[in-house]
Image (cartoon, rainbow, N blue to C red):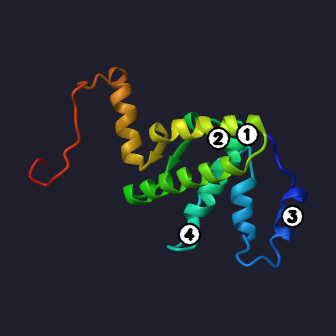
């Protein structure tokens, strides 16, 4: 995977100057910084989904499979929105790509999107426990109590 230097990130930030909707330095950092996990936390309407979408596309183009990513959101609605935006962005990026390798990476991502780990922590935990119930001697037919009557 390509690791961008601080100088390269500075150049990306400078390239945004004068654009109609420039990315902020923080957005550029979150999109292009590699070699570390990141937490994108900001107020509503500040561009979290945009940043996450751009970061995921950048990772895909650098050879990271969606199967190897865990993408957590705080709500199911946010996860659904992120999947929709990713689908659209992957298709748009793929339509403009000329490199066979990048088209292949984007096609694989599109195929993996429906089963990608994009969701809330409780959904991920439920999936993990369903797949690994035997490690904690759980009943393999367990389920979550979802309403107050059950609880």
Other residues around mark 1 within 10 Å, as few (<14) / some (14–19) / many (≥20): some
Is residue 112 found left or right of 124 in the rendered image? right
Q: Position of residue 30 (x, y in %)?
A: 69, 58
Q: Position of residue 36 (x, y in %)?
A: 70, 46
Instruction: Indicate which disc, 2 or 3, sits on the residue closer to the N terminus.
Output: 3
* Residue at which label 3 appears: 10
Viewer-nearest residue: 143 or 51 = 51
**At 59% across and 60% down in the image, what residue appears?**
40
Which numbered disc, 1 or 3, marks the residue closer to the eye? 1
Q: CA distance from mark 4 to mark 2?
A: 28 Å
Identify whether 134 is placed above or below 26.
above
**At 53% across and 36% down in the image, what residue appears?**
111
* Residue at which label 2 appears: 106
Q: CA distance from mark 2 to mark 1?
A: 6 Å
Q: CA distance from mark 2 to mark 3?
A: 27 Å
* Residue at which label 1 appears: 102
Q: Position of residue 80 (x, y in %)?
A: 42, 54
Viewer-nearest residue: 133 or 52 = 52
Which numbered disc, 4 or 1, marks the residue closer to the eye? 1
Is residue 98 found left or right of 79 in the rendered image? right
Other residues around mark 2 within 10 Å, as few (<14) / some (14–19) / many (≥20): many
Q: Are marks 2 and 1 in contact (CB under 8 Å)?
A: yes
* Residue at which label 4 appears: 42
Disc 4, SS = loop
């Amino acid at each position: 995977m390509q690791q961008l230097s601080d100088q390269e990130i500075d150049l990306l930030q400078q390239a945004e100057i004068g654009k109609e909707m420039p990315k902020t330095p923080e957005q550029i950092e979150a999109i292009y910084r590699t070699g570390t996990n990141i937490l994108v936390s900001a107020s509503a309407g500040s561009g979290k989904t945009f940043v996450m979408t751009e970061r995921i596309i950048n990772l895909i183009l650098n050879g990271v499979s969606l199967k190897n990513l865990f993408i957590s959101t705080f709500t199911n609605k946010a996860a659904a929105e992120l999947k929709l935006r990713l689908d659209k962005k992957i298709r748009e990026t793929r339509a403009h790509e000329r490199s066979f390798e990048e088209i292949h990476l984007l096609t694989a991502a599109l195929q993996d999107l429906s089963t990608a780990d994009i969701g809330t922590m409780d959904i991920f935990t439920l999936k993990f426990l369903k797949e690994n119930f035997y490690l904690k001697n759980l009943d393999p037919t367990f389920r979550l109590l979802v309403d107050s009557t059950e609880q």
